[in-house]
Image: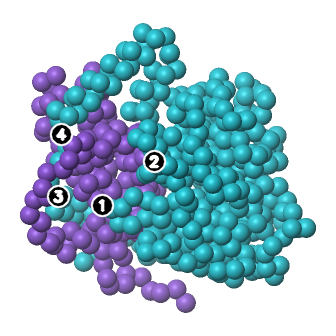
Amino acid sequence: MTIHDERRITDLLHRVDVPASRADIERAMADGAALRRRRRAVLSGGAGVGTVAVAAALTIAVVQLAAPERAGPPDTTTDPSDVATGLPEGNCQPEPLRLPPGGQRVLLAAIDPSGRYVVGHGTVNGAQAGILWTDGSPGVLGGPDVRVRAVSRTGAMVGFRGTRIWLHRDGAWSDLGVNGVPQAINSRGDIVGGDTTGRLVVWPAGHVDQPRVLAGGSTNNLLDYYDIADDGTVAAPTSDDRPRVWAPDGTPRELPMPPGLTGATVTRVSGRWAVGEGYRPDPNLTKDGRSIPLPVPLRWRLDTGTVEELPIANPNGIVDVTAQGVAVFSGVTQPVTLVAPDGTQKQLPKPGDEPRALVEGISDDGRTIAGDAYGIGDESIPYVWRC
Amino acid sequence: MADYVEYVSGRLPALHRAAYLLCGDAHRADDIVQATITALYVNWRRASRADSIDAYVHRILVHQFIDEKRSRWSRVRLMRHPPEPPPAPDPPAPNLDDAVVDALRQLPLRQRTVLVLRFLCDLSVADTAQAMRCSTGNVKSQTARALVAIRPLLDPTPTRPEKP
């Protein structure tokens, strides 16, 4: 069987035998009415922001996991890795992250560049809550239910509630008073994300009321990744599919593409390294003569301005890069894999019996990798690989 | 709310099919659809004034799917009460069904979503872009890549020469 065209996939999707639905319209109306009552109660209480949050919980597209901030140059005095390849030593055994009492359905959001902090979101005793692991020990974030997006090396977290951006520092959430969707935060407290008009923006630490718009950026794309290094360098999707990063002052810097690519985007930066994905026209034309772009994983050296293709057959799941240039990938059909600057690869053990894992990030020293392990149809389990 | 009941009753099978093909699991599909029609009830007045209710509902469904998959934040559990005794197991699905569902599962999330919205839900490029919160160009490129990606997953015969 061969899929030739859109008509064929349309036919297949409609023909699949789907189990009967158990959704309940009466239940939906009852729950919906209760939510309306809650909304009115919040309104009558004068808590306007809360009202926005309730409504947003139902309608907002929450499509982006946090991108952890990246660090500056590596600390070579404590470099624990194989000097020749940059790959971490050891067998990198996966360990499930301990959940807080009453915690379930937890999904990770980010790991900080030091590897000390991991953040996620789930339910704790039936209520939605953010969870911060510090050195593997879980703690429930109190206060308002803010959707955590990223954590910095200092342990500061950024998230959103309704349309507002919130910052967690010194043990408490605070409303920064600006609207948008934050995507990443660096150790200085600079935040990158999208504003309410869809522009790529940096909210500088301490001056969030003076956002800096990054020309040529794109935002709010489904499941794209964003990054802001400690020096303020930003990686983000672009409006024209040309790979670029933005200097700390907001100046865009175009990056090269290997010959033959039609476009690329940078997903993460760390020190002098960046990773991303490019697109190459398929030499095999479709029946109607079109050439369709195929994804190609890329790694750049920002100091030399060079780019290379990574030797990965299935680049789906490119996620992160360490300060020493080790790229980490994951995919639904392949194990978590590290690729050193010299091309040496290291595949990490599967997490238990789970058939697949999605990596969310790697520490700058490459020794701690965080991600979620999935069974088919099961709840995910948060894991860390420690090397 | 008779119009709500009428609309949802008519669209429930299609919504469930879309959710099932997005997530590949019947129970999760139930959760996604339940959350979707709950949100639709809350926002029914707005939805009923939309240019296309279907497009509006599919936006909610995609968002619920992403939430359910990626954060579990706003997840609504279908089974509030103890479940009824399970019905007799369904007969094994035909191989074609397994192949299609497995192939969709192997696609990246964006590609899977764009295939379901464009070719199952019959959303326009513009409505798909709005549901996925991306540009129309992004929808087109994702569609092209998804069609290429799913081809070998559905066809055990190699369609292109191995790279040297």
Q: Using the image, name the chain to which the residue with label 1 belongs.
A: B
Which residue is disc 4 drawn over?
A24
Provide residue A337's location: percent of width, then percent of height: 59, 75
Q: Nearer the viewer, residue A152 or A191?
A: A152
Q: Confirm whether circles 4 and 2 share one chain.
A: yes
The amino acid at mark 1 is Gly
- Give me the C-alpha separation between circle 4 and circle 3: 15 Å
Instruction: Tell me, yes or no, whether the two marked residues, 4 and 3, touch with CB atoms within 8 Å.
Output: no
Above-or-below relation of A298 to B113: below
- Give me the C-alpha separation between circle 1 and circle 3: 11 Å
Comparing labels 2 and 1, the label whose residue is closer to the camera: 2
- Give me the C-alpha separation between circle 4 and circle 2: 28 Å
Please give the label number shown on residue B24: 1
Comparing labels 4 and 2, the label whose residue is closer to the camera: 2
What color scheme is it? by chain
Task: Classify residue B157 by image quadrant.
Answer: bottom left
The amino acid at mark 4 is Asp
Q: Using the image, name the chain to which the residue with label 2 belongs.
A: A
Q: Which chain is cyan?
A: A
Which residue is disc 2 drawn over?
A102
